[in-house]
Amino acid sequence: MTAVTSLTLTQPDDWHLHIRDGDVLRDVLPHTAKQFARAIIMPNLRPPVTTVALASAYRSRIEAQLQASSISDFTPLMTLYLTDNTPADEVRKARAAGIAGFKLYPAGATTNSDAGVTDLKYCYATLEVMQKEGVPLLMHGEVTHADIDVFDREAVFIDTILEPLRRDFPELKIVFEHITTRQAAHYVRDADTKNKNTLAATITPQHLLLNRNAIFAGGIRPHHYCLPVLKREEHRLALVEAATSGNPRFFLGTDSAPHAKGLKENGCGCAGCYTAFNALGLYAEVFEAANQLHRLEAFASFYGPDFYGMPRNTKTITLHKVPEKVPHELPLAETVVVPLRAGETIAWSLAE
Ligand code: NCD
Ligand code: ZN
């Protein structure tokens, strides 16, 4: 079989992305917009984007930046940050305003999640309306109790939060974001959704490419620290199997999460990998290594919009099997960000 040297795909979307605000937004947005037509924009700003009014203002800032950067073919899909106090009525407003979903951060689970949900029971009236209105719940799927081992937090979340939630809201559309374990991959694969399109998961490039050894290779590697934290090789293999299986419940979400270099290389470093620089090239490596390159397009470009009930993109983009050099650092406001693979290469690059 001759090796594939170029790959033309329907333009993909990124179903989980952090682009922050202000000058950071200015610097990271072009990387995403070069590859993706749309992206689900995470609401964990400081303060968090908890209302339709805040999301509309954030959308306007993104649109202004797109215009300033002469980007005309990218659409931000806005989300709201769910809190213990999100009124049920905000869901109706969100739906009317074209908000793509609500994000559940268990309080304290990750970057800027202090205002997150302390107990889902406070949200039941709001979830009821989400279920009724078909507004998806996007979940950071980890419990946060200090007595639960950090490597077990996702698996415990499935048993103690997700499964009861799905029992109580069988028709609620749920995206289990950035899954990292065999348990999550199998839970999503095997869940009985009564033939309804109610459960899906996104998978990041770093969780498909790296296992937890990457955090400790020869010393502590802060740029490989993200949440949920990388897991053992057996989990990475289960994620690759899920992503490349052609199952429409699994689709692309980079979770690209820029942090200034100094906040990563730090006594208490921030969580997040910056993958937006050439995320699609990273995913192509994964699918190629699994001999499933022909399934990349559906994972990257079809299953996400299908789940969210949005049209698939019509433009195409082309990747070439030409290695792309990843810079050691990229500009990030008045500082720099260290991208995943910094100083190395990615096997696939985007055609200009
Ligand atoms: C994200 C961030 O920096 O906002 N960090 C991360 O490690 N993924 C937050 C998140 O998605 O958990
Ligand atoms: Zn994230």
Image (cartoon, helix red, strand yellow):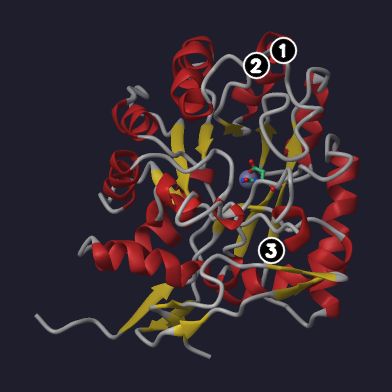
Q: Amino acid at mark 2?
A: Glu
Position above or below: 186 against 221: above
Determine contact: label 2, label 3, CB under 8 Å.
no
Mark 3 is surrounded, within 10 Å at the Cα level, by few (under 14), some (14 to 19) or many (20 or more) other residues, namely some
User: Farthest residue in the front direction?
Assistant: 218
Q: Which residue is mark 3?
A: 75
Mark 2 is surrounded, within 10 Å at the Cα level, by few (under 14), some (14 to 19) or many (20 or more) other residues, namely some
User: Farthest residue in the left direction?
Assistant: 1
Q: Which residue is mark 2?
A: 128
How far apart in space, not on screen, are marks 3 and 1 (Cα)? 30 Å
Position above or below: 241 against 259: above
Position above or below: 260 against 323: above
How far apart in space, not on screen, are marks 2 and 3 (Cα)? 28 Å
Across and down, in percent, residue 127 comes to 66, 19
> Which quarter of the rendering shows the N terminus?
bottom left
Q: Amino acid at mark 1?
A: Ala
Say which mark, if any, is on residue 109. Answer: none
Across and down, in percent, residue 152 comes to 46, 24
Q: Kindly identify the residue that appears in the image at 47 percent across and 88 percent down.
A: 351
Q: Which residue is mark 1?
A: 125
Q: Secondary structure at mark 1?
A: helix
Across and down, in percent, residue 93 comes to 81, 34
